[in-house]
Amino acid sequence: MNPTNNQPPRTARAVLWDMDGTLIDSVPYHLQAWQDVLRQINRTVEHQAWHQTAGMRNSEIIPLLFPDMSPAESASLDRAKEARYRELIELQGIELLSGVAEWIQRFKAAGWKQAIASSAPRENVVAIAHVLHFNGTFEAMISGADVQRGKPDPDIFLAAAERLNVLPQDCLVIEDAEAGIEAAHRAGMKAIGVLNTHPHLEADVVVRSLQDLSWETIEDLMRPTGGFALMRNT
């Protein structure tokens, strides 16, 4: 740290990973959890309607999908759904998406700091970290509980940068949802969009899979004069 202005050195870089849809394919687990708990209260939700809420917190999703629910009912549904999701993860297990493990190791070898920055409840982040045996892989894990506003507000990414002591402009966000990419840009960060859950994204770099990403692309992107949309495999 620079002792004169209390700012981290510009040599410090960080990669901020979204979790659901980026590190893992959690869509089937979330959908199953929704179906299971909604069935118990005689409610349903269409897959397409739920799919459009990707990257949002339950506190935003439930009023959108079920505007007639009382705050108490919404809070109860929120707790039940997330508890069921964690139960499914523990029972069935889950794997990292293609290319994720390799890039985690490449960033680590290059000396980058790494954090999870997810809108999910903290208990979900902890559960995924446990099931996947992260064991210190990430220097910080920021959840929706750590900030007042979820994505597309930039709070989660700014909190992660602060926790890692890295300037926002030296952080790279990896995301699968438009809300997350907007949040990254509003935080003053570059964003890589991975087309795991959406057919189209507006990010600085867009790839179908992290296996399509190159280190040269990342270095070009993170230069102070780095270009926009250097790689768009859509």
Image: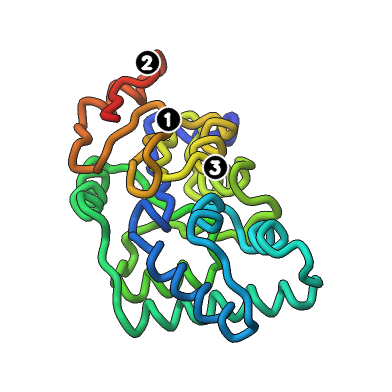
Q: Residue at x 78, y 67 (%)?
A: 68
Three-letter amino acid code of the residue under disc 3: Ala
Q: Position of residue 100 (x, y in %)?
A: 25, 52
Q: Secondary structure at mark 3?
A: helix
Nearer the viewer's eye, disc 2 or disc 3?
A: 3
Near mark 1 (Cα within 10 A), the count class, few <14, some 14-19 or many ≥20, is: many
Picture coordinates of residue 71, whole percent (x, y): 80, 71
The mark nearer the N terminus, 3 or 1, is 3
Of residue 139 and residue 60, the one placed in the foreground of this image is 60
- The residue that label 1 is drawn on is 203
The CA distance from mark 3 to mark 1 is 11 Å
Q: Is residue 33 left or right of residue 146?
A: left
* Residue for point 31% across, 69% down: 135
In this view, the residue in front, 230 or 198, is 198
CA separation, marks 1 and 2?
12 Å
**Residue placed at 37% from the left, 35% from the top?**
192
Q: Which residue is mark 2?
A: 227
Where residue 146 appears, as percent x and y from the top left, is 62, 59
Number of marks: 3
| Element class at badge 2 | loop
At mark 1, the secondary structure is loop
**Mark 1 vs 2, N-terminal side:** 1
Q: Are marks 3 and 1 in contact (CB under 8 Å)?
A: no
Q: Nearer the viewer, residue 134 or 207?
A: 207
Q: Residue 234, how many percent across, how many down? A: 29, 30
The residue to which callout 3 is attached is 179
At x 38%, y 49%, the residue is 197
User: For the residue carrying disc 3, how many other residues have a C-alpha within 10 Å: few (<14), some (14-19), or many (20+)?
Assistant: some
How many residues crowd mark 2 within 10 Å: few (<14), some (14–19), many (20+)?
A: few
Residue type pointed to by label 1 = Ala
Name the kind of residue labelled 2 in the image: Gly
